[in-house]
């Protein structure tokens, strides 16, 4: 179905519908109002292990970071859970600067936002700041089946799992003229792909390194390494925070808070508690 | 913030004037097109001709057509009214954005009751917040909701009689189309985004909502039948598994049936259009990718695919094949017409799917050089969007221009067919798109290879054009152009008139033969819905839902200049001849 629809009309969650408190649709707040209200609303991906997971009351690296940041600001944390839209532009619109078509959001800030010079140059609706982690793609493999991984050749005969419509998906479907296409197994999420790896449905999974580390934490017989493909293994990107354009005070306060959390090691500890290697941006 | 949605059932039953209905039957629905006192189906007859045998309003007296009443849908959320109302026994049933349904006294405009569907937390439907209409059967009025449910309400009280889940909204399914009744079954399609949904058609018992059969519209998926107790048995795979898809991509193939379907009692077939294949980039899925971008004809009695016709094999432009297939008689044959997104008009044998004729209905088509003798497109490889792997070095990929744009030569707005003139009246749009691979893109915290695109106008003077097209010759007999893109549907009548609405807010009428505009009225907000007509107490009424929205206002660039001054709305307008 058409991109315009997916692009514009999905929304993460529904709070207020017609009638009710629609007129009081939320607005992202700057620092003074956040402090006055004693509460900060934080946009968190709903199903994004190990970073944020709305199940069981909400857990994950980003949830912990959000709590640490709220504590630093001396306000209560209110998570606004949402589903990833077609791309981050949509997520920023839904959760940072505008809100969804159903009046859900926006939040006061969002985590896990790329801090990329070209990307920033094309978006004047939000402030990107406070990079707190560096991400890249990796391949996790079953060591019994693939003791080493020097090239993608292994996937001419071995199955590899990917999350549907991700960069790894596109790469595995198109690399080397589509040589691996018939061995790509599609999963709805990276965590489902990792479950598939554990169950032996696939010999490997390509996803973000943080997803693989978190998902395989404590599991034996797997290795995580960089994909043997320059186009993908050269790529790394810092992740940080975003607030609505104009909310410089909140951005500065959050930046100070992130600096302190990085300096005293609590940021690294939050990642390690979820099995993820902390990679400073 | 709290989640409070009001499943408000306001009002109760009223004693109103108009014919007394003992309950809508299958027979009533099958002859809907010939009974102007009611409108019992989307399409004003499940064949979808949108032709009324009413002739009280004519080119001569239409200057006396004036508003009879207007009704506001209220609420703070508007965003596009695409609904076609139904008329049963003097009651109008019209759906509105955000999964609402209103029952209105068709003569006075007084509200009888309204239903606001309770939408759950965590909902993320793909396909905007519009709704295109309801179905009626017996004492029920049935519509689909944004959280992919079907709700059947009592026509008199507005009370919920049954509610069934079509699919899991959390997995990306939604529903915006009007259901239809065929052979006593309720037929529905499904909407879904690029989340790996699989299109299908479901048949249910309209009295209970229980499934009778289900037919996937992606090759390789099993269809099922259900007995009265709900036990499921296999009913054959759609097509041949993996024949036209590489790897496991058929499992998440797309081909959503998001505009619903039509049904022709003369063929016993239901015709559903299937959307684009997934993933979006065609280079990742070499093959025809059946039944994406096709019309699929399903034998309603068996739930089996009788034939299919693919308009855009291996689609690379997002030319959904969902547009309606409208059946008609011509030269002793039962034929069907479809004005596809891809800019070609197709005439097929409605019984067999055999290609009879195809021709452009828009003036600029660049993605294909034409159609071959079997109706297959002759591609222009230079105008196929590029392979993402070729731009994976972090540079913006090559820009390709293609016309029509992905919003199509025609989109969701239904066309009409007049057996009097023998013309189809097609609400067409002239536009193209630039499209490129976009490496500086992110998705859920990860680098991503997205596609960038922008819509371009191809004519300074207009985008929209209502066109009278002769399916026998392929000739455009007349056209009336419009500055903004057309997004509402069309109605034609025995009175020799064609009615349609514009985003600028005008409901217009033209002489069906000559294309001379003979009437217009500004309803105060853009029209993106098809007009209707019916007769009550000897008078002919014209009605249309009004409220600017849908896909068009979401786009920037050249299109925005023509629409960004338009205001949203939400109302029902009804007209009749002024009597002095």
Image (cartoon, rainbow, N blue to C red):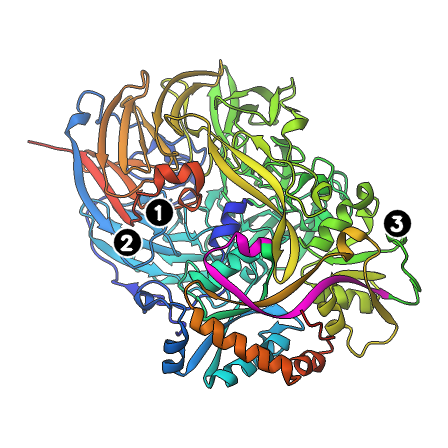
Chain of the residue displaying label 3: A
Q: CA distance from mark 1 to mark 3?
A: 51 Å
Question: Seen from this angle, which residue lies furthest left?
Answer: B580
- Contact between marks 2 and 3 (CB within 8 A): the answer is no
Instruction: Give the residue at mark 1.
Output: B81
Magenta-highlighted residues: A118-141
Q: CA distance from mark 2 to mark 1?
A: 10 Å
Q: Closer to the observer: label 1 or label 3?
A: 3
Q: Is residue B17 above or below residue B146?
A: above
SS assignment at label 1: loop
Q: Is residue A236 above or below residue B19?
A: below
Is residue B407 shown to the viewer in this render? no
The disc label shown at residue B73, or none: 2
- Compare marks 2 and 1 and give the one earlier in the sequence: 2
Instruction: Give the residue at mark 3.
Output: A156
Chain of the residue displaying label 2: B
| Quarter occupied by residue B283 | top right
Both marks 1 and 3 on one chain: no
- Contact between marks 2 and 1 (CB within 8 A): the answer is yes
SS assignment at label 2: loop
Both marks 2 and 3 on one chain: no
Left or right position of B257 against A195? left
Relative to the observer, which residue lies in front, B499 or B30? Answer: B499
State the image coordinates of residue B109 (x, y, percent, origin top left). 20, 48
Left or right position of B45 against A233? left
Few, some or many C-alpha atoms within 10 Å of disc 2 (few <14, some 14-19, many ≥20)? many
Both marks 2 and 1 on one chain: yes
Relative to the observer, which residue lies in front, B106 or A111? Answer: A111
Left or right position of A84 against A209? left
């Amino acid at each position: 179905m058409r991109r315009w629809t997916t692009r514009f009309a999905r929304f993460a969650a529904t709070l207020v519908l017609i009638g009710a408190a629609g007129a009081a649709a939320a607005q992202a707040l700057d620092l003074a109002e956040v402090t006055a209200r004693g509460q900060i609303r934080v946009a968190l991906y709903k199903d994004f292990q190990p970073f944020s997971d709305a199940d069981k009351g909400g857990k994950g690296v980003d949830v912990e970071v959000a709590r640490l940041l709220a504590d630093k600001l001396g306000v209560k944390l209110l998570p606004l859970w949402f589903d990833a839209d077609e791309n981050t532009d949509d997520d920023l619109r839904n959760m940072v600067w505008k809100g969804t078509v159903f009046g859900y959001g926006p939040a006061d800030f969002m985590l896990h936002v790329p801090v990329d010079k070209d990307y920033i140059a094309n978006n004047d609706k939000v402030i990107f700041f406070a990079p707190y982690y560096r991400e890249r793609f990796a391949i996790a493999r079953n060591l019994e089946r693939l003791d080493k991984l020097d090239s993608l050749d292994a996937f001419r005969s071995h199955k590899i799992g990917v999350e549907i419509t991700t960069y790894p998906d596109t790469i595995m479907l198109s690399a080397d003229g589509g040589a691996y296409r018939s061995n790509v197994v599609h999963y709805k999420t990276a965590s489902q792909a990792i479950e598939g790896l554990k169950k032996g449905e696939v010999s490997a999974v390509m996803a973000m390194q943080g997803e693989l580390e978190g998902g395989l934490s404590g599991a034996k017989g797997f290795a995580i390494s960089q994909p043997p493909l320059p186009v993908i293994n050269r790529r790394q990107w810092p992740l940080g925070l975003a607030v609505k354009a104009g909310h410089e005070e909140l951005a500065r306060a959050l930046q100070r808070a992130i600096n302190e959390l990085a300096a005293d090691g609590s940021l690294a500890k939050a990642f390690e508690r979820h099995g993820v290697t902390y990679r400073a941006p | 913030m709290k989640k409070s949605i009001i499943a408000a059932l306001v009002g109760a039953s009223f004693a109103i004037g108009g014919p007394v209905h003992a309950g809508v039957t299958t027979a009533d629905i099958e002859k809907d097109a010939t009974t102007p006192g009611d409108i019992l189906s989307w399409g004003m007859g499940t064949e979808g001709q949108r032709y009324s045998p009413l002739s009280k309003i004519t080119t001569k007296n239409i200057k006396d057509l004036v508003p009879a009443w207007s009704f506001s849908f209220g609420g703070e959320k508007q965003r596009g009214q695409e609904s076609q109302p139904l008329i049963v026994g003097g009651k109008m049933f019209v759906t509105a954005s955000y999964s609402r349904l209103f029952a209105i006294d068709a003569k006075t405009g007084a509200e009888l009751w309204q239903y606001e569907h309770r939408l759950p937390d965590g909902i993320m439907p793909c396909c905007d917040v519009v709704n295109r209409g309801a179905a009626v059967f017996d004492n029920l009025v049935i519509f689909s909701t944004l959280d992919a449910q079907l709700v059947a309400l009592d026509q008199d009280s507005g009370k919920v009689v049954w509610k069934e889940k079509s699919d899991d909204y959390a997995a990306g399914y939604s529903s915006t189309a009007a259901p239809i009744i065929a052979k006593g079954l309720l037929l529905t399609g499904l909407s879904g985004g690029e989340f790996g949904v699989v299109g299908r058609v479901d048949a249910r018992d309209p009295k209970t909502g229980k499934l009778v059969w289900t037919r996937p519209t992606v090759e390789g998926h099993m269809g099922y039948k259900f007995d009265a107790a709900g036990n499921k048995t296999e009913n054959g795979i759609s097509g041949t598994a993996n024949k036209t898809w590489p790897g496991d991509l058929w499992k998440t193939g797309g081909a959503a049936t998001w505009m619903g379907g039509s049904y022709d009692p003369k063929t016993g077939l239901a015709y559903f259009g299937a959307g684009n294949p997934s993933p979006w980039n065609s280079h990742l899925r070499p093959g025809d990718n059946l039944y994406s971008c096709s019309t699929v004809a399903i034998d309603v009695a068996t739930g089996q695919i009788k034939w299919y016709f693919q308009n855009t094999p291996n689609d690379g432009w997002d030319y959904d094949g969902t547009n309606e297939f409208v059946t008609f008689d011509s030269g002793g044959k039962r034929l069907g017409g479809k004005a596809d997104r891809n800019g070609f008009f197709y005439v097929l044998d409605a019984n067999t799917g055999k290609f009879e004729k195809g021709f452009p209905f828009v003036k600029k088509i660049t993605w294909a050089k034409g159609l071959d003798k079997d109706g297959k497109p002759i591609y222009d490889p230079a105008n196929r969007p590029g392979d993402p792997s070729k731009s994976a070095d972090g540079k913006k990929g090559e820009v390709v221009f293609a016309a029509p744009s992905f919003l199509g030569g025609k989109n969701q707005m239904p066309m009409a067919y007049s057996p009097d003139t023998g013309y189809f009246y097609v609400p067409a749009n002239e536009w193209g798109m630039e499209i490129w691979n976009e490496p500086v893109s992110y998705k859920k915290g990860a680098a991503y290879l997205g596609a960038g695109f922008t819509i371009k106008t191809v004519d300074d003077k207009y985008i929209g054009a209502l066109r009278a097209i002769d399916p026998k010759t392929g000739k455009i007999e007349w056209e009336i152009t419009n500055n903004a893109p057309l997004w509402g549907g069309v109605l034609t009548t025995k009175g020799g008139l064609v009615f349609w609405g514009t985003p600028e807010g005008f409901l217009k009428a033209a002489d069906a033969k000559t294309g001379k505009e003979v009437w217009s009225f500004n309803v105060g907000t853009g029209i993106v819905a098809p007009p209707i007509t019916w007769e009550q107490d000897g008078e002919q009424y014209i009605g249309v839902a009004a409220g600017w929205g849908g896909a068009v206002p979401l786009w920037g660039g050249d299109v925005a200049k023509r629409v960004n001054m338009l205001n949203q709305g939400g109302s029902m307008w009804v007209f009749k001849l002024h009597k002095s």
